[in-house]
Image (cartoon, rainbow, N blue to C red):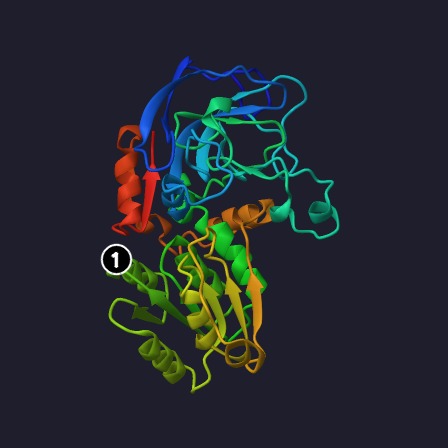
Amino acid sequence: MVTHEGVRTNRTDGVNDVISAAVLAAPNQRIEVRSFDRPRLEPGAVLLRTLGSEVCGTDTHLTKGQLAGVPYPIIPGHISVGVIDEVGSGDPVLDVDGKPLVAGQIVTFLDVYGNCGRCWYCTVGHATTRCPSRKVYGVTLSADEGLLGGWAEYIYLRPGVHIVPLPAELDWRAFLSAGCGMPTALHAVTLAEVDFGDTVVVQGAGPVGLSAAVLAQLRGAGQVIVVGGPEVRLAAAEKFGADTTIDIGATNKAERLSMVRELTNGRGADVTIEATGVPSAVPEGMRLTRDAGRYVVVGQYTNAGEASFNPHLDLNQKHLTIHGCWGSDVGHVYRSVHVMAKYAKQFPWTELISGEYDLAHAQDALDDVAAQRVVKALIVP
């Protein structure tokens, strides 16, 4: 057994040689539970005993085949937390802070694996999320290659995966309550350069939108307006500090624009962050933003279709700054962990969790997320 005093062996107590995982065999098929052999660890690898894994909108897109390059069958689950169960032989495996990892630690990890560190995007463009070698746990790594997704009793972390321990003051459920929404939103809010006193409109009340609303407050926003639905998510936005919520089910585009203008002395938002995944939200968000304002589009993770806008009226004459924001890197995950730990008493993170599901009920979790019956659903094997 490995202890925190640094005595290093390979296994904790309780060996499980047959491991269950939830598998999506192909698009438009139901989740099934399959058995896997316990893997033999290569040097530098880590085996996690899964505590929990999130269910997010990306997982619903995966079930419909809406993401390119997915090597079905897959084990879904790209943001997860687990207890280190076994560490591969050889040199110590280090966390992001450069400290040796030991069995018994509760950790999360960057779901992105395989960035080359040598291509133009990694070295010159400083845009690692666009590295052509980039793979993602639970999304673009096949179940035929092993336990490479979070909806499983154990997760195999290949050598080189970026691992971040959770601070003692951050409950693992609290971290997963935002899931990938928090590092994604942190990336978006950073690009938006939210300043003290800014009015920020957040389009979308899912985990990304709710996280963006929280982070905008922490960046000093003077007013946060959340546009979205359904009611369960808008209630969460209010509980987490949004000054105003606007229900898209009870308003049309003209009414929403009028409401935002009324709240901003006729100008519109200083910053708007799109976190809906609905293409028509993008031109609407441009119009919700004031002249010379800033607009960050983070929700268009899949190809859900096209939307049109007027280049003169909606963009150029408005002198609008627009950022596309794709994914997150290890810095966003690391900062998310520490922000959530710092403000754990101020924001009741775990209240965002609407339901927990075991592997046998993973399909129910997907159905509830797709129908927006929940704010956050977790798979707890």
Q: Nearer the viewer, residue 85 or 272?
A: 272
Q: Which residue is mark 1?
A: 232
On the question of residue 16 being in view, the answer is: no
- Please tell me whether residue 178 is drawn above or below residue 37 in the rendered image: below
Q: Quadrant of the C terminus?
A: top left
Please state the horizontal and vertical placement of residue 86, each as a whole percent of the image.
Answer: 52, 20
Q: Nearer the viewer, residue 332 or 1?
A: 332
Q: Residues within 10 Å of mark 1 (few under 14, many from 20)?
A: some
Give the total number of marks visible in the rendering: 1
Q: Residue at x 60, y 39 (%)?
A: 134
Q: Residue at x 48, y 72 (%)?
A: 309
- Please tell me whether residue 351 is drawn above or below residue 282 in the rendered image: above
- Please tell me whether residue 159 is drawn above or below residue 232 in the rendered image: above
Question: Left or right: where does residue 163 sit relative to residue 269?
Answer: right
Question: Left or right: where does residue 159 sit relative to residue 184?
Answer: right
Which amino acid does the dot numbered 1 rest on?
A: Val
Q: Residue at x 68, y 37 (%)?
A: 116
Question: Left or right: where does residue 41 sit relative to residue 370?
Answer: right
Q: Nearer the viewer, residue 151 or 50?
A: 151
Q: Nearer the viewer, residue 277 or 137?
A: 277
Please state the horizontal and vertical placement of residue 138, each as a whole percent of the image.
Answer: 46, 35
SS at badge 1: helix
Question: Which image quarter: residue 238?
Answer: bottom left
On the question of residue 60 being in view, the answer is: yes
Q: Residue at x 32, y 31 (%)?
A: 31
Please state the horizontal and vertical placement of residue 203, each as a whole percent of the image.
Answer: 40, 65
